[in-house]
Image (cartoon, rainbow, N blue to C red):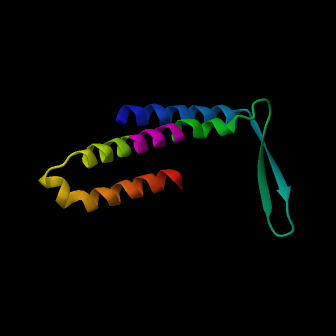
Amino acid sequence: MIGMFTVCTALSGWFMWRNISQATVMVIALPRSTFCRITPKDTPTLFAFWIPVIGFESLLCLLALLAGLHTFMKDDFYFRHSGKLIKILLRDSIAYFIV
């Protein structure tokens, strides 16, 4: 898991560095302040920054769903007492992913 997180962080950082290093910054003067805008020169692929992030979050959601499925399929004494906790954890994990 730590390895996957490291790979996703490195890929996102590389995408961000590649796009920012090839961009120019425009300063727009407003009446009471200034506004900066980044304009990419050749590669407008800043959206690719989110691909590894979404991939890692999808993996976490999948693991939560598999753990919940495994817990719901068990039918022993432990499940009867921890069912509410597992339901809350699954609900929050899935809601976090969707939001």
Magenta range is: 54-62
In the displayed structure image, the side of residue 91 where residue 31 appears, left or right: right
Q: In which quarter of the image is residue 40?
A: top right
Provide residue 63's location: percent of width, then percent of height. Answer: 36, 41
Residue pictured at 41% horizontal, 33% vertical: 4
Q: Going by the picture, which residue comes out furthest to the left?
A: 77
Residue pictured at 19% horizontal, 54% vertical: 79
Quick one: quadrant of the N terminus?
top left
**Is residue 59 part of the magenta span, yes or no?**
yes
Prevailing secondary structure class for the magenta stretch in the rendered image? helix
Q: Nearer the viewer, residue 8 or 36?
A: 8
Provide residue 55's location: percent of width, then percent of height. Answer: 50, 37
Q: Is residue 76 above or below residue 46?
A: below
Residue pictured at 29% horizontal, 56% vertical: 86
Provide residue 82's location: percent of width, then percent of height. Answer: 21, 58
**Is residue 32 part of the magenta span, yes or no?**
no
Report how many numbered discs are placed on residues in the image: 0
Residue pictured at 21% horizontal, 46% vertical: 74
Q: Which of 6 and 98 is in front in this view?
A: 98
Quick one: quadrant of the C terminus?
bottom right
In the displayed structure image, the side of residue 78 where residue 46 appears, left or right: right
In the displayed structure image, the side of residue 86 where residue 31 appears, left or right: right
Provide residue 44's location: percent of width, then percent of height. Answer: 75, 35
